[in-house]
Amino acid sequence: MRATNTEKLPQTFELTPSGSPMVIVGCIVVLVAVLVGFTMAGGHVGALIHPSEFITIGGAAFGALIVMSPKKVLVDVFKSVLQLLKGSPYNRAAYVELFKLLYVLAKLVRRDGMLALDSHISSPKESPIFARYPKISHNHHAMDFLLTALGLMGDGGDSEKLLAALEEEMKVIDREHHAAVSALARTADALPGFGIVAAVLGIVVTMEAIGGPVEEIGHKVGAALVGTFLGILMSYGFIAPMAGRMEYLGEAEMTFFRTIASAVAAMTEGAGPSEVVARARRVVSTDCRPTHDDMKAIAQEEVGV
């Protein structure tokens, strides 16, 4: 079979999200820009602090998220948000470690045959090979996909069938990730509406005090308007951007999995270790792609199998 079969994998050229500092910096920039502009116009930050508005808008949005999301989607949303703060695990260091692991596995298959992988696949936690690469072995998503790919390779068949099976696996993973992204994006879309709800409730409270002092009425009207402000700010300043960043995290994961699929397909075709990692490198986005010096170091490194 021709080596070009592995090139049928769709390539992704996204920029992999950097670590959590950029998320935090972005949130700070949003807050600072809004608050500085408000104070420059003569406003007082204290006028924006109304805990009741936060509870109304935040609680309603959270309740809506619960209503629209099955349990698994809800759990995936929270896990994804935490991952945003931790940053993407699929960086250049992770790819270098992946290529080292793939090189060793390809070397083992080339020397001893596919049956030599059985003990490592059946007991990955006890495998001395996987233990040497913690960035991969401690990432259960990557390990599950790698073990699935190696298991399919051991079952026999050509690389085209293997790639087709792995693409189906990736479609399921991608669909589940998009479900979490969609749930968060819909919550962001609902926040301005909940801001209006909070504002209307504030007007109701204001009408109850319509015969009171002017200062009190002005305070209550201001609190009502803050509800609209918070709903829009939370939507377009925080939640919607987080949903967008989750989308990039998902694309980064898919690229990592396609790299694994390309390498395992190359092993199925009988390619040597250097050719396996070279083909896999072509799938990697440019910001995470190991350099040629990295690839030479991988090929020259003496790794015991």
Image (spheres, helix red, strand yellow):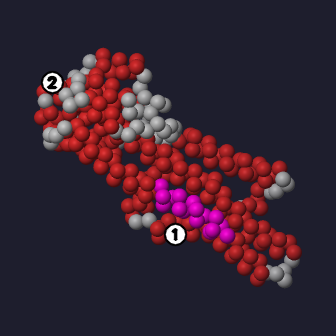
User: Measured from the top left, where is residue 301 in percent x and y?
Assistant: 30, 18
In the image, 84 versus 264, the foreground residue is 264
Q: Earlier in the sequence, mark 2 or mark 1?
A: 1
Identity of the amino acid at label 1? Gly
* For residue 258, above or below residue 242: above
Image position of 172 (left or right of 265): right
User: 67 or 53, which lies in front?
Assistant: 67
Determine the main secondary structure of the stretch shown in magenta. Answer: helix
Q: Residue visible at 38% across and 61% down?
A: 72
Crowding at label 2, few (<14), some or many (≥20) Cα neighbours within 10 Å? Answer: few
Element assignment for label 1: helix
Residue at image coords 54%, 62% = 187
Question: What residue sits right under mark 2 in the picture?
Answer: 111
Q: Height in image: 243 above or below 56?
A: above
Decide if residue 78 is in sight here: no
In the rendered image, residue 151, in percent from the top left (x then y), is placed at 19, 42
Label 1 packing within 10 angstroms: few (<14), some (14-19), many (20+): few
CA–CA distance in space, label 2 to label 1: 57 Å
Quick check: 41 left or right of 273?
Answer: right
Who's the residue at 15% across and 33% down the image? 114
Residue range (magenta): 181-196
- Which residue was labeled with disc 1? 63
